[in-house]
Amino acid sequence: MLNRIVNFALLLASFTIALPARAQTPPERLDPCVEIVQESSLMTRPMLRQFSQVARGSARAEAIAVLGEPYCRLQPLEVELPDGSMATVQREAYPFEFAPHIWYVVMYAGDRYLTFDYSFPDSGRSN
């Protein structure tokens, strides 16, 4: 019985020694951009208000007229459309001027504005 207690204590001690070393290892930083387009590009509140008036399905040129060039382009996504067909969605990111750690991501299917999402690149999480 004493042997079991000693073995358990040694096992427990090895875990408590190993855990802090793992916790100190920083997570790998993944850069979500595949291409930097305009380093100074930011999403301002007035731009956001104006862009909210751009209808989904509008021409990409109409969206770009409001937003200007993006900060960067993200990896394209393959998505299934409601009719069951597949489409490649291009994604362009605009960091918020008032919260640069959050990006406004505009998505296009071909030359049409599809939708938007948010990305949190500093956390390693991208939607």
Image (cartoon, rainbow, N blue to C red):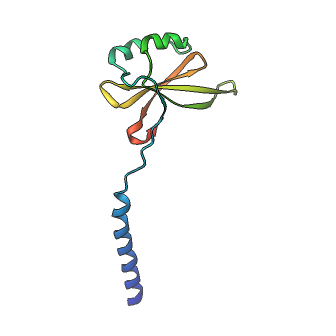
Quadrant of res 84: top right
- Residue drawn at x 42%, y 15% is 67
Q: How many marks?
A: 0
Q: Is residue 89 left or right of residue 8?
A: right
The percent position of residue 125, horizontal first and vertical second, equals 44, 40
Question: In the picture, residue 24 is in which quadrant?
Answer: bottom left
Measured as percent of width and height from the top left, residue 30 is found at 45, 42
Which residue appears farthest toward the left when viewing the image? Answer: 98
Choose between 55 and 93: the one closer to the eye: 93
Q: Quadrant of residue 122?
A: top left
Position in image of residue 77 (x %, y %) = 58, 31
Can the viewer see residue 120?
A: yes
Quarter containing the N terminus: bottom left
Q: Position of residue 57 (x, y in %)?
A: 56, 14
- Residue drawn at x 58%, y 26% as measured from the top left: 89
Q: Is residue 52 visible?
A: no
Name the residue rendered at 33%, 63% in the picture: 20
